Amino acid sequence: MRLEKASLTTLPNGNPILNNTCSYCAGLAPAQAFVGVRFEWETKMRSDHTRRGLQELRQVRQQDHALFWVVGLFSLFANLLMLTGPLYMLQVYDRVLSSESTETLIALSLLVLFLYGVMAALDFVRGRIMAQVGLRVWRALQHRVFVAVMRKAAVLPDERTTSGFSDLDMLRRVIAAPVASAGFDLPWTPVFFAVIFIFHPLLGGLALLGAGVLVALTIANQMLSFRNQAAAGYHGQAATNLAEQLRSEAESVRAMGMTGAAFARWQQANDLVLSADMAAADTGAGFSVFGKVLRLLLQSAMLGLGAWLVMSDQMTPGGMIAGSVLLGRALAPVEVLLNQWPMAQQARLSWTNLAALLGEVPAETPRIALPKPAARLAVQGMTVVPPGDRIAALRSVSFTVEPGQAVGVIGPSGTGKSTLARALVGVWPTAGGHIRLDNATLNQYEPDALGRHIGYLPQRVELFDGTVAQNISRLSPAPDDDAVVRAARMAGAHEMILGLPQGYDTRIIAGQLRLSGGQLQRIGLARALYGEPVIVVLDEPNSNLDNAGSAALNHAIRQMKEMGRSVLIMAHRPAAIHECDMLLVLDGGMRVAFGPKEEVLKGMVKNAKSIQTVSPAAAGMR
């Protein structure tokens, strides 16, 4: 296999595709034939994304540089005041005890009390500032992260979309945690060592040696525990996702006798989490205990060496006690880092995850607000490659929809109908060609504005926690009651909603309110119609509807056509295309036919090339 003959071609929108000039690879799938090239390209793309994301995170962090300087200034005075205790002991042992002056002892004690009070105030204010910095970072990134998670989850969800919100919260918490303040104290550790050296070089050398061993322990802890902690986080998220999936499908699990098998899978996932957690905990606990014993041993060694120096008349007793206290203060930041190293490691992982997420999903550039478009849709040579795939699901598809038209899209399963629906509503990007709404491409509209102009009913309707009215109004904080009722009436759901326990105010909470598939679909249709969108895309809208529901759907389509709106219906069942004026037939991701419904159906029957068994009579032809 000659991979050097594989090349990358960039489409007009920037998406790369692989060109195959190797005869051996011609019969293989692109992902198999060019796995080496693809891996190299994807690795480069990931690193580029991470660099862009890091730049964005650093810009947010730089907004609080002034506050960091204030914290650094407070840390300067707080660490200088930490010399209060050693100097007090030095004076008491070397002067007060020898002079037996009560007045000097009282004056020194009052001064120490005042200085410790100032130090406590500085530490408190410093902690409050760091907490505010964490909150400011969280607020600066919350909308950006939320939009990035939503955009990526709608296209190609992965572990970053499930951990994005918790990663952001971890950054907030670690900035406010003692481990961040320890970073400001750590630079002052050499100052305390220098003071210990002033007392006696041997004491300074012993302190420096012990600090070096503790730093080595910290580095070893990082190297040995990071992999286990990362594995624990990954397996933990996987176990959470599995548990949520099993919970949401509990009815099927129980009905089909899958409880035992489901428990086995859940137990297996949790065993991986526990194994990684225990490995990380054992590593961290071992280093923590060893570090604690080493610090105690070092302080005792300092006292022992200091006592020998005092007996040798090389230093005073006050210097011996002060040196031991200073050693404890010098090693305090290292101790905090050792104790809170798991949190620091998790924050580092969260920082990297957020950088990758934000780099992969760049911020959307502001767009000029366009007027409400006409219900005119033009698809020109559209090619769509599903996210994460390398094979186009739709290729060079073209058609137009005029105001007041209903277009049915038919074809066998897997031919690209749902892909077309996702592309038309702007969820999946096109790899080639254009989709124009009233002559403007979809990317010229703000995403939320586009969502108001295009209604969408997906195959699987999911409702959110809240009232029925809030779900129909698309979670609007101030829903228009009249618009909610109008949308429900048009969807034929008004009477059904009135039959619920509290009508439109009935709260929908997962697991507490059971709605049938037809009820969910009719509420979802009302949500798609809310706000009077000019284009409505319905993906298998009658898959769960009974005859009355199908009749209500057809009535809604007629109303939309009369109001000059356009409707696109991805359909398997003939009843769904009853009100359609035009038909688009897809096969193998390509347009097979497009035109008036009667002509297309007659041509399909005549040529025995029906995508599915649809007769003109069954399709509602007159």
Image (cartoon, rainbow, N blue to C red):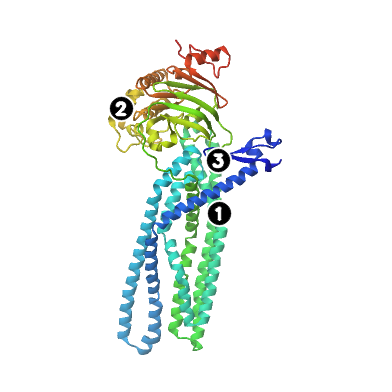
**Residue 74, image x, y percentages:** 37, 68
Residue 228, labelled with which disc? 1
Q: Are marks 2 and 3 in contact (CB under 8 Å)?
A: no
What residue is shown with label 3?
Answer: 265
Identified by mark 2, the residue type is Val
Marks 1 and 3, how far apart at CA: 21 Å
Label 2 packing within 10 angstroms: few (<14), some (14-19), many (20+): many
Q: Amino acid at mark 3?
A: Arg
Of 131 and 374, nearer the camera is 374
Is residue 64 placed above or below 557 in the rendered structure?
below
Badge 1 or badge 3: first in the primary sequence: 1
Q: Secondary structure at mark 3?
A: helix
| Residue 37 seen in the current view | yes
Q: Amino acid at mark 1?
A: Asn
Percent position (x, y) of residue 272?
A: 56, 48
- What's the distance in space between the residues labelled 2 and 3, CA to CA? 45 Å
